[in-house]
Amino acid sequence: MEADRFDKFYSTTCSILKSIQKLKSKYMMHYGLTSAHTMCLRHLNASPDGLTRTKLAKLCDIDKAQISRIVNDLCSKGYVTEPESENVNYRKRLKLTPLGRDTAEGINEAVKQIHSFVSDDIPEDQITSFYSVLDLICEKLKQAEDSL
């Protein structure tokens, strides 16, 4: 019984992740960006004072090397700016350009549409319960990584 539940959990979460990746790719293609840029743009948009590369890497759960490539790409395409005055890349506060802010707002609208499509028919108490349990499972899995 436990193995069946784990298999169901694993299969379902993998399917969810694949669907999210496909939706990200579909919507980001319009901007000429990959799905890896989505979370960076959204987090920067939610932080008007800017974020360091280190903080952005933590928020997006992406390693520093990948964040560096993504940030460099976003800077070269005019979506993100970083100050020239500081010497250390990981201390500079990255900010969205006007183009970056407009793009992030467009992405946020797409996220709202998807969220509405997915969850409007589900009662709020079930969604609250779902996320509460999902958070607990996530925390327990992280504990298992360290303990087992």
Image (cartoon, helix red, strand yellow):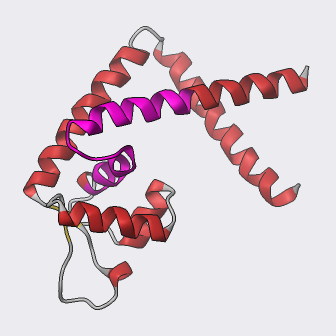
Q: From what the image shows, is residue 92 above or below residue 13?
A: below
Residue drawn at x 65%, y 31% is 133
Residue 49 visible, this orientation:
no
Q: Position of residue 87 (x, y in %)?
A: 29, 91
| Quarter occupied by the C terminus | bottom right
Furthest residue to the left? 98
Q: How many discs appear?
A: 0
Image quadrant where residue 114 sits: top left
Residue 85 visible, this orientation:
yes
Q: Position of residue 28 (x, y in %)?
A: 28, 39
Q: Position of residue 66 (x, y in %)?
A: 45, 64
| Most foreground residue, 30 or 147 | 30
| Most foreground residue, 28 or 85 | 28
Residue drawn at x 68%, y 39% is 136
Furthest residue to the right? 1
Residue drawn at x 38%, y 13% is 120
Magenta span of residues: 16-44
Image quadrant where residue 10 sits: top right
Give yes or no for residue 103 being in the magenta stretch. no
Relative to residue 14, is residue 10 drawn left or right?
right
Q: Position of residue 38 (x, y in %)?
A: 33, 46
Give yes or no for residue 40 being in the magenta stretch. yes
Q: From what the image shows, is residue 15 above or below residue 108?
A: above
Residue drawn at x 36%, y 15% is 117
Q: From what the image shows, is residue 74 above or below residue 53?
A: above
Relative to residue 30, is residue 118 drawn left or right?
right
Furthest residue to the top? 121
Q: From what the image shows, is residue 95 above or below residue 82?
A: above
| Quarter occupied by the N terminus | top right
